Amino acid sequence: MIPRDPRFAERTRALFDATPFLRHLGAELLRCEPGRCEARLRVAPWQLQQDGFIHAGVQATLADHTAGAAAGTLLAADEVVLTVELKINLLRPALGEELRCAAVVLRPGARITVAEAEVFARRGAEEKLTAKAMITLTSAPSR
């Protein structure tokens, strides 16, 4: 995949880091390549649901934003990416001290892009796939 902005990595990281909700959650972008991004989140007690598992909303947010970042790597400098559809399968209860999300663009398009994201929970030395998401995104002019 070929990025349309030569400064895609710098721009993608800046947008990821500037998102207030991601900063609140504690998510950070680890890796950024054309059409691929990886992020992580160190889990805090307030991100758990009533049974002690990592909340589905935390996993969905991480999947959505990481996929959006992956799609954003392929945009022109004057465009932004917006999610138009998000479908997530929660494959097992998420337990652990950290989430890692790997997202890849499956089909880039002029207006519509499809990406997938996998969320893994790390508990000690063990990492398990806890969620898989399909995300449809659109590009729009930046504000």
Image: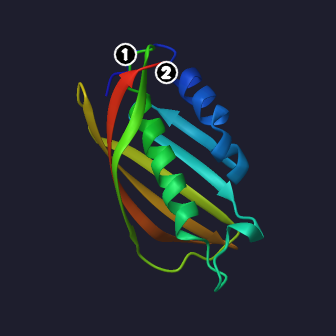
76 to the left or right of 127: left
Residue drawn at the location 64% of the way across and 46% of the way down: 21
As measured in the structure, the alpha-carbon distance from the residue carrying label 1 to the one carrying label 2 is 8 Å
> Which residue is farthest front?
143
User: Residue 118 placed where, x, y %?
Assistant: 43, 59
> Which residue is farthest bottom?
51
The foreground one among 7 and 81 is 81
Q: Amino acid at mark 1?
A: Arg
In the image, residue 89 sits, relative to residue 77, either above or below, namely below
User: Residue 72 placed where, x, y %?
Assistant: 43, 30
User: Residue 134 placed where, x, y %?
Assistant: 32, 55
Q: Amino acid at mark 2?
A: Phe
In the image, residue 11 sits, relative to residue 131, either above or below, namely above
Q: Residues within 10 Å of mark 2 (few under 14, many from 20)?
A: many
Question: What secondary structure is marked by label 2?
Answer: helix
Q: Residues within 10 Å of mark 1 (few under 14, many from 20)?
A: some
Quadrant of residue 54 within the rendered picture: bottom right
Question: What secondary structure is marked by label 1?
Answer: loop
Residue drawn at the location 62% of the way across and 79% of the way down: 53
User: Residue 75 placed where, x, y %?
Assistant: 38, 22
Residue drawn at the location 43% of the way across and 37% of the way down: 70
The reply to whether residue 36 is in sight is no
Residue receiving disc 2: 8
Quadrant of residue 5 within the rendered picture: top left
Quadrant of residue 86 within the rendered picture: bottom left
39 to the left or right of 80: right
The reply to whether residue 66 is in sight is yes
Circles 1 and 2: CB distance less than 8 Å? yes
Residue receiving disc 1: 4
> Which residue is farthest right?
45
Residue drawn at the location 37% of the way across and 16% of the way down: 4
